[in-house]
Each structure stands twice: as structure tokens, then as C-alpha cells.
Amino acid sequence: MKVIIVDDERLARNELKRLLSKHSNIEIIDEAKNADEAAIKIKEQQPDAIFLDIHMPGSTGLELAESLGDDVNIIFCTAYDQFAVDAFSLNAMDYLVKPVNPERLSDAIAKLEARLEQSKQQKGLPDDHKLMVKYGETMRIIPLSDIIRFESIGNHAAIYTPHGKAFLHSSLNKIEAKLDASHYFRASRSDIIRLDAIESMEQAISYGLEAKLSNGQTVEISRRQATKLKQLLEFTQL
């Protein structure tokens, strides 16, 4: 499980890293010392969760959590216990008070693991789910199955269908949460592709894969996700 630590105090970050190092199922992929820096790193790296302090220079942890919405699981880690109600009103997964108790940390990690596993097992929208999509000045109603690829572009997502390219006002994380994993696959932090639209794949220079889709586009699958895709499709190692 990939996590980012957000805390303005270096010693506090180091202590949390020490505690988390005892959990082999946790990978600390980055850290940030304020909310602005964290927002950028979260968008770029898409962690499974963040450990978030509340009192920091500039925007508070509560303000960052509100801006993130449901895009990432949040475990607050703070020296103050009076903000717990506010934290849970923002759908925080847990609230740890410093100095962090190792047993409480283990409980929070178990909750995170359970939530991620549950989200994997949940079925997404059916293929015949209807979407209203704007192509230029024309509105079309299309089935979800028409969408071959979702691509992250800024705060929006471009979709590619037989009718052409259109845009959705949503993040890839929110879109992915609604999709059926048996039909769509997260190729990288910037792309989700439809599995039955893959016509061929080749090894990429980056040790990932390059997938050629039925609409002629080529999408790079990251090294980490390429391994998952091979397992999903029962590929033997190349």
C-alpha cells in the first residue's frame, strides 16, 4: 500500500517513517512538509493513503482534506485531539494522536487494507450504463462500453470513443472507483484503458508495456501495472 507522509516537522516525519517501517505491507513513496506540496505530490503519485498533520504553515490539513474529497484515504496524525469531529466529517479513515501508539497505528493500517480490498471486490457500473457526453456542440447518450480510454488532462479526463474525443469533469481516481475492474484497467497514473480494446502489446523501453488499442492509439502501461496486467490476463513472464 503506497502512502505519503504530510507533516511540517522533520522529526515527526522521521518518527512516523520508523513506525511504518515495521509494516511490510506499507511503502512510503514520498513525504511533504505543507499542504501545497502535498497536493502536487498526491496528484502526481496517487497514493493509496496519506498520513496527514493538521497544523502546518499555510493551508491546514483539514483544508487539504476538504480539497481532496474522496480521491485518497486520509489518516490524520496530529498532536491535537480536538479536531477529531471535523476530521471524521471529512470522511477521514482514522485519527491518530501524537505520539502515535504502535497498536493504534496497526489498527489504522488494518482498516486501510480492508478498505482497499473491499474497493477491489466491488463491482462497478454495468457496460450498458448510459452517459450524456458533449462532442463539440452535440450531446450524445452513449453506453459506458463505448469508452475505449480515459486520459487525465489537468483536472479533467478525456474520453475516447467511436464518436471521437470528449471530456468529463472528474478525476481518474473518481472514475476508476466507479468502473468494473473486469472491463477497465488502470494503465498508469494518467490512463485507464478498456481491456477488450487492447489489440496487441509490446515491451516498452521503460520495462513496462505499450498497448495498441482498437482505435489506433498506443498507451504506455507502467512497469508496476504491466506486472499486474500480465497476472490478470495470465501472461507468462516475457
Image (cartoon, grey):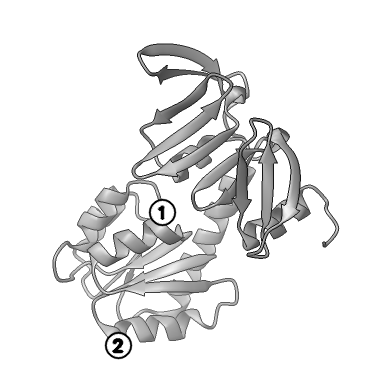
What residue is disc 1 on? 72
Q: Nearer the viewer, residue 127 or 225?
A: 225
Are there few (<14), some (14-19), or many (20+) residues within 10 Å of tag 2?
Answer: few
- In the picture, measured across the screen, residue 71 lies left or right of residue 79, that is right
Query: In which quadrant of the rendered view does residue 127 lie?
Result: top right
Residue 5 in view: yes
Residue 16: x and y in percent read 39, 81
The image quadrant where one finds the N terminus is bottom right
Residue 235: x and y in percent read 83, 53
Q: CA distance from mark 1 to mark 2?
A: 24 Å
Q: Residue sitting at 50 percent across and 53 percent down?
A: 189
Q: Nearer the viewer, residue 100 or 57?
A: 57
> What's the residue type where badge 1 is placed?
Val
> What's the residue type where badge 2 is placed?
Leu
What residue is disc 2 on? 11
Residue 217's place in the image compared with 81, above or below, is: above
Secondary structure beneath dot 2 equals helix
Residue 43: x and y in percent read 38, 55
Residue 61: x and y in percent read 24, 62
The image quadrant where one finds the C terminus is bottom right
Q: Residue sitting at 48 percent across and 38 percent down?
A: 175
Mark positioned earlier in the residue sequence (1 or 2): 2
